[in-house]
Amino acid sequence: MSHNSFGHLFRVTTWGESHGPAIGCVVDGCPPLIPLTEADLQPWLDRRKPGGSRFVTQRRESDMARILSGVFDDGNGPVTTGAPIAIQIENEDARSKDYGEIARAFRPGHADFTYQAKYGVRDHRGGGRSSARETAMRVAAGAVARKVLGDGVRIRAGVVQLGPHRIAPDTVDFDAVYDNALFAASAEVVPAWEGYLDGVRKAGSSIGAVVALEVTGLPAGWGAPVYGKLDAELAAAMMSINAVKGVEIGAGFGAAELTGEENADAMRLGEDGRPVFLSNHAGGVLGGISTGQPLTARVAFKPTSSILTPGQTITRDGAEAEVRTKGRHDPCVALRGVPVVEAMAACVLADAMLRHRAQIG
Amino acid sequence: MSHNSFGHLFRVTTWGESHGPAIGCVVDGCPPLIPLTEADLQPWLDRRKPGGSRFVTQRRESDMARILSGVFDDGNGPVTTGAPIAIQIENEDARSKDYGEIARAFRPGHADFTYQAKYGVRDHRGGGRSSARETAMRVAAGAVARKVLGDGVRIRAGVVQLGPHRIAPDTVDFDAVYDNALFAASAEVVPAWEGYLDGVRKAGSSIGAVVALEVTGLPAGWGAPVYGKLDAELAAAMMSINAVKGVEIGAGFGAAELTGEENADAMRLGEDGRPVFLSNHAGGVLGGISTGQPLTARVAFKPTSSILTPGQTITRDGAEAEVRTKGRHDPCVALRGVPVVEAMAACVLADAMLRHRAQIG
Amino acid sequence: MSHNSFGHLFRVTTWGESHGPAIGCVVDGCPPLIPLTEADLQPWLDRRKPGGSRFVTQRRESDMARILSGVFDDGNGPVTTGAPIAIQIENEDARSKDYGEIARAFRPGHADFTYQAKYGVRDHRGGGRSSARETAMRVAAGAVARKVLGDGVRIRAGVVQLGPHRIAPDTVDFDAVYDNALFAASAEVVPAWEGYLDGVRKAGSSIGAVVALEVTGLPAGWGAPVYGKLDAELAAAMMSINAVKGVEIGAGFGAAELTGEENADAMRLGEDGRPVFLSNHAGGVLGGISTGQPLTARVAFKPTSSILTPGQTITRDGAEAEVRTKGRHDPCVALRGVPVVEAMAACVLADAMLRHRAQIG
Amino acid sequence: MSHNSFGHLFRVTTWGESHGPAIGCVVDGCPPLIPLTEADLQPWLDRRKPGGSRFVTQRRESDMARILSGVFDDGNGPVTTGAPIAIQIENEDARSKDYGEIARAFRPGHADFTYQAKYGVRDHRGGGRSSARETAMRVAAGAVARKVLGDGVRIRAGVVQLGPHRIAPDTVDFDAVYDNALFAASAEVVPAWEGYLDGVRKAGSSIGAVVALEVTGLPAGWGAPVYGKLDAELAAAMMSINAVKGVEIGAGFGAAELTGEENADAMRLGEDGRPVFLSNHAGGVLGGISTGQPLTARVAFKPTSSILTPGQTITRDGAEAEVRTKGRHDPCVALRGVPVVEAMAACVLADAMLRHRAQIG
């Protein structure tokens, strides 16, 4: 219900502004006795961290997360206690001086105007609360969620479209994602894409992208009917990520062009007597409940609105102005969005697991 | 939180199965003193009602809604009292005999398998709780939400893509929607589309479609940051509609191909000194908060899985089988989805209005 | 969150006014495969039903509950399906004519004034939404909750104080409660109490009372720390019952006079090696979590405000007036409150059971 | 919903253990543009702070709260921005060595046993999450809530009963509370009470108490019917405070002995034409909605279970044992409970204010 929380039973609340002293989150409802240390969080945070390559913002943050509560070592190593887990990262490289001009002018495509319109005040330093920096906490919470889900559930995402360039669906390879600076779900496209994105970057421009998600190892039965549908929860989680403008499950928008015959995923019995689907247009969800097939989704990111080309805008004092982003920025925000998409999926699924367990036992 | 409720302050809970005695909903949190009678609900329900044309299921339901609580006439006509509004529709034409075979076999593409997998039992009659019949209650609740929003907020949707056939964006005309049996957002396409859909229908097949949504008259400032984003709430609401597989806001998936320069919606001052956007790639939402521009979204519906062609499936007893839908069905579920999309948008916006008022005053 | 719902996972929403066409509730989140028919509800409803004796309102209602959804008979008898369970009772004996005067004047001690102050309108017929009639739906939901909890959890309540007359704690006998018209937790006091309450009734007066609650068969570990404490949830549930003005757990207000030595419940090991408490000042809850001992609480009811003595009041038009209750009423609302206290406890505990299962497995 | 959060729109989430590195809270949903600095929090925290007198635990904590987010100074002083407000206090004097024995043995009357029973693990250091230290964050959140409510709403509490010693209701003086180390609501009783409590303290014992609450300046109309009742929310909030065993509103348990005539609060018109109640047995709430009269409640605290007398208990390894509290403790926890009661009332009321504004405007 609150604006800065999500999840029902595995519930995450985040706080903090881009240029405040710190950002943090509280993960409540986590089951007890799960081994957890900061070392479980850091690898995921490192993937999202700025400064990793020339394709992401050059802001320097070590993004070292501290766990401040909810974990206790009673002799066998630190485990969750069932109490709320507070995680925190100090902000280090917050160059507020870069952002003087945007205190007055609303950057086009940013939340500057709407925050001001709603609240009558905004922390303009680096985008304040609307900065992508907030997503570090999603990644931290997602790392906890992964521990709740266990190793059997595998959550992977990757860039499958960079501007006009697409990876053919049958060549998508999620194993390639974290081996290239573009988070591309195919090693083959990397050289060409690097050249393309270098051009975008040097032009001071930016470009949109599509991130694909695949989750394997889900049992059939997670999720819930009607308004608690697993895909509805997933859609909200994805659409809540900065810069996301579209979400589709399984065949998605492509399903609009299919006939009933084409779209139906026939079922047979596997050798072990368990249901096997002969295709997966459903994307692993029917009636809001997991089928046991891979959960597949695609998420569209808009280009970052921080570009060097001056943009026409207005100021909070009611004057017309031009504004140009002088700060550091990402030429394609979707890249660092990949670990965020994974993290949000992990949180939604951990929540679904607990909710399923509650009702079904 | 509960599985059959949505909304935070304007909160709707629905209940009922396709072939049970009745379906209903409870709308809680409605402001008081709003004139409301059954006549306010019926026109919207009639638009969604089965049996209206050859393009929708021939099930016969008068869909007469009764208001059982929350409204009181103290001499000046019935008004809401702030108490929960219970709305109910009796089920009339529930031919359970049509559905004998599907008690055992899981219809491909339906929720039969997942309900059984989750609950160990399912009301198979006409799809039970997962039937599109449930959406009648969304429409009823949406009619109440429209009254809360008032006439200034105009919510319109229409089919803009039927299978492979698309309406060019610049010819979309929402005024045409309720004047044709296809709910098409253009009068021009109707003859051709009717021919196409007749072919689909006669073949016992079905086809997917895309519904566009446009809301005008919204003030800037509704919605909330981070996890309570207006577009995240809208995405969940849309994805919770039966057969929906994708949601996009503004430029949506198209934004993945845009550069930052193309995507930025420049701002100028209008003649009245108020902000004017020169384009609306954002779809009326920035940072999860309304900009005051039209809210635009597109929703992809899969083809109904009820088709005459026998489909390969399994039974709940673990045998392979073929199943063929003998009951009545819609050749394109998206058609009757149009008033549902509108209704869900109305509910999300009424909720956003109340939440905004709570925090901002 | 919504005003007319309670519970988190076992979630109950009620609707309906005293003199509207019907009252009802929706129970969402119920586990599947639990045998349930209307016959499971009726015995509990009959205990709360008006017209049962001269000590309760003479309004005549058969209070026949119908289950309209969420239950399905697939050949082995009706069971819950996991879908929302809608329960409904038609209002029969709604003599609106009795209530003409109170359309204008606010009855002292009733919610008339506050509803008008808040909403600017109220359904004054029989108290509308604030009528004790709403509690029938709590009892119906409680009956479902009992089925979720199973027979191992035994929930019993009874009147232990009627005005100035108290039952000595060591003579409280919950088995006696439903064998006497006063719901007294002792057969011995019945003759004297009947005489006393007859006097109150004949004088057109009313009197307060205290209801004690005892739940046995709870495991240790239900509930949750800090804000989700089992006793906090129970306190809210009890205080939400019409006319309740106080709630205490275990030693309650008496604990204010105890020393730490007196109050501590010492622990020993029982013959089976399980923990045994040598006393139960805690009332079965420590730190918000059940200890496995009996859960004990006491609930104070004020006298009904419906009395024959004219009371000084004001009208909604801003005039002073006198008002006298001419309708039927209960001389002691706490009597029919006994099954309501039990029902609310059942709902809180079913919810706690599901929440525990979610987090702990 | 989550276990460590409360409030619906003004929503507080707390985290942290007694002997962890820090404790903190996140206040979400706060309206923007409210001046707020750490200086607004500190006076309330100082009142609850340990070490202030010989009657409270001698643990030394400066309890200096830092605000880490949600406040921004745009030139006119720091104001809330509508973003979540994170507040944090470092733990300084966490002598874990004092608590070695209780790692194994469950202290009678504490949550040791139930945490272990529920979670299978517990942070035993100083009570971990169940320590009264958590209430510092309630006080911090309450200070924010007071700012939301404004100066017109005055929230005061004080000890009115210390063990067997009571302050006569007509001599209760809330102005005296913060002028004496006992938080007594009467200057006259202080010398005698100090002598009494010194005896308790020197004996290594403890004693219970009752805290009274009075809120003035509330408008009529806050709160909500049925399950969202203002008094139900208040009861839950109070019962969630460590050591609280009872809550009553207005006449409370005393109402059980009143007749309808005695209990009715007659209404007249005041000189300004506004409603005046001639008494306040209702405690300022009718039907769950505020009447505009003072909101009055009483809260019973049990004696702290930390006493020097050895208590019989068992260990987590299933052995019988004796345990004696060697750490520092409060002879009467209710004393420091006074600012906590006030804070919880402030939070409940700020939430009610926002909810009222949402539905009514």
Image (cartoon, coloured by chain):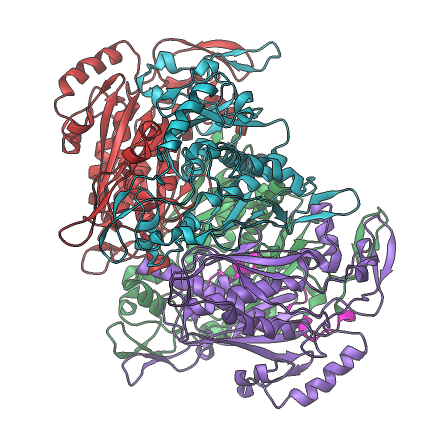
Chain colours: A green, B purple, C cyan, D red
Residue A91 in view (yes/no) = yes
Q: Please name whichever residue, C309 or A108, is drawn nearer the observer in this view of the structure.
A: C309
Point out the residue furthest to the front here: C202
Residue B294 is left or right of residue D276, and the answer is right
Q: Is residue A255 above or below residue B130?
A: below
**Does the magenta segment cover residue D41?**
no
Q: Please name whichever residue, A311 or A123, is drawn nearer the observer in this view of the structure.
A: A123
**Residues drawn in magenta:** A233-262
Q: Is residue D339 above or below residue A265?
A: above
Which corner quadrant of the image does residue D48 belong to? top left
Q: What residue is drawn where x is 53% and y is 48%?
A: A142
Residue C354 is left or right of residue A286, and the answer is left
Residue A186 in view (yes/no) = no
**Which quadrant: the C terminus of chain D?**
bottom left
Residue C176: x, y in percent?
54, 21
Residue C15 is left or right of residue B164, and the answer is left
Residue D210: x, y in percent?
28, 25
Which corner quadrant of the image does residue A26 belong to? top left
**Does the magenta segment cover residue A261?**
yes
Q: Is residue C276 above or below residue A210?
A: above
Residue D102 is left or right of residue C357, and the answer is left
Q: Please name whichever residue, D156 or C316, is drawn nearer the observer in this view of the structure.
A: C316
| Numbered label tally | 0
Residue D297: x, y in percent?
29, 34
Residue A335: x, y in percent?
52, 63
Q: What residue is drawn where x is 45% and y is 51%?
A: C2
Q: Please name whichever residue, B333 or D325, is drawn nearer the observer in this view of the structure.
A: B333
